[in-house]
C-alpha cells in the first residue's frame, strides 16, 4: 500500500466518511482477535505491548458504529517510530496531525483510501490507556450502564455537529454563560469551535434529549 498521511489540511472527506450506529454484531470479538494477531505479528517481537479491544464494539450486546477500536499499550515511547511502517503495511492510514505528543492513531478503510472505516488503532502509553479500558470493563460489568450509554448515543446520533461541538453549544445554552474559551491546539479544533459558536445554543428539542441523561450529583448526602 502506498504510504499516505491524513493531515486534514489538503482535502476533506466529511461527505464520504459517514458511519452509523448498528446493532451489536457477535462477530466483532472474533474480528478483533484476527486483527490483534495480525498487529502482534507485525510489531517488533522484542517489545512488550498489550493489545486490547476497547470502545463500544468491545461490549457484548451494545449497539455501536461498526469500527473496531484497538489500543496498543507500550511503555517504550522512544521506539514508537518502529510502529508506523508495520501498521501501515496492514492498510492503515497514519494520522500525523494528532495533537497529543504521546499518542499515535491509525485508521483503516477511511475514504478516500477505502469504502468506510473499519478499524482504529490507538498507540498509547500504558497509563494513558487505563480510562478507556476501565470504561469498557464498567460497561461489560453493568448492563444498565451500557443501556444508558447506548440510549445517549442513539439520541445524539441525529444531532448536528461532533460531540465536542454539541458540548460547547450546550454550555452556550445556559443563560448564565456568555463566553466559552475552548482549546486551540490545532487548526481543526479552532474551526470546530467556530462552527459551534456560529450555530449558537442548542435547540429546545436537543436540550430536552440531553436532560433525560442528566446526572444529578449531590455531594452533601
Image (spheres, helix red, strand yellow):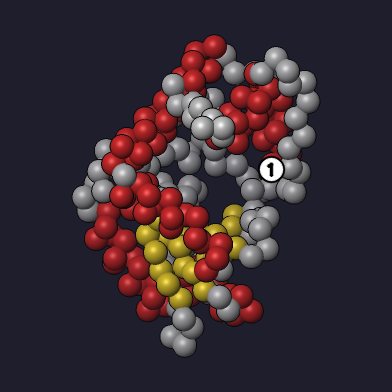
> Along the line of sight, which residue is nearer the eye, 108 or 36?
36
Quarter location, residue 76: bottom right
Quarter location, residue 61: top left
Is residue 42 visible in the rendered image? The answer is: yes
Q: Is residue 137 above or below residue 72?
A: above
Q: Residue lying furthest left in this view? A: 26
Residue sitting at x 55%, y 42%: 13
Residue topped by disc 1: 188
Residue sitting at x 45%, y 62%: 71
Apparent side of residue 65 relative to residue 46 in the rendered image (left or right): left
Residue sitting at x 47%, y 68%: 72
Coordinates of residue 190 in the picture (x, y in percent): 73, 39
Residue sitting at x 54%, y 11%: 204
For label 1, the SS is helix
Q: Residue lying furthest bottom in this view? A: 46
Q: Residue lying furthest top in this view? A: 204
Q: Is residue 132 above or below residue 145?
A: below
Coordinates of residue 159 in the picture (x, y in percent): 50, 24
Is residue 85 visible in the rendered image? The answer is: no
Q: How many marks?
A: 1
Quarter location, residue 120: bottom left
Apparent side of residue 20 relative to residue 178 in the rendered image (left or right): left
Coordinates of residue 11 in the picture (x, y in percent): 63, 45
Q: Is residue 17 above or below residue 5?
A: above
Apparent side of residue 211 relative to residue 39 in the rendered image (left or right): right
Coordinates of residue 28 in the picture (x, y in percent): 27, 54
> For mark 1, does the 10 Å Cα neighbourhood hold few (<14), some (14 to 19), or many (20 or more) residues?
few
Q: Is residue 152 above or below residue 208?
A: below
Apparent side of residue 109 relative to residue 81 in the rendered image (left or right): left
Amino acid at each position: 500500500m502506498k504510504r499516505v498521511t491524513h493531515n486534514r489540511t489538503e482535502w476533506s472527506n466529511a461527505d464520504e466518511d459517514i458511519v452509523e450506529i448498528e446493532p451489536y454484531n457477535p462477530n466483532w470479538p472474533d474480528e478483533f482477535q484476527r486483527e490483534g494477531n495480525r498487529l502482534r505479528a507485525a510489531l517488533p517481537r522484542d517489545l512488550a505491548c498489550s493489545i486490547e479491544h476497547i470502545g463500544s464494539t468491545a461490549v457484548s450486546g451494545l449497539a455501536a458504529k461498526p469500527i473496531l477500536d484497538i489500543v496498543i499499550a507500550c511503555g517504550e515511547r522512544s521506539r514508537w517510530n518502529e510502529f508506523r511502517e508495520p501498521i501501515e503495511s496492514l492498510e492503515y492510514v497514519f494520522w500525523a496531525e494528532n495533537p497529543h505528543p504521546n499518542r499515535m492513531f491509525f485508521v483503516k478503510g477511511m475514504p478516500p483510501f477505502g469504502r468506510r472505516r473499519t478499524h482504529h488503532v490507538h498507540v498509547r502509553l500504558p497509563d494513558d490507556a487505563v480510562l478507556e479500558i476501565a470504561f469498557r470493563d464498567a460497561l461489560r460489568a453493568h448492563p444498565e450502564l451500557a443501556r444508558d450509554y447506548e440510549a445517549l448515543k442513539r439520541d445524539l446520533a441525529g444531532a448536528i455537529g461532533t460531540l465536542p461541538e454539541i458540548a460547547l453549544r450546550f454550555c452556550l445554552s445556559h443563560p448564565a454563560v456568555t463566553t466559552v474559551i475552548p482549546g486551540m491546539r490545532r487548526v481543526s479544533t479552532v474551526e470546530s469551535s467556530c462552527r459551534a459558536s456560529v450555530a449558537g445554543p442548542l435547540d429546545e428539542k436537543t436540550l430536552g434529549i440531553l436532560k433525560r441523561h442528566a446526572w444529578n450529583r449531590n455531594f452533601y448526602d
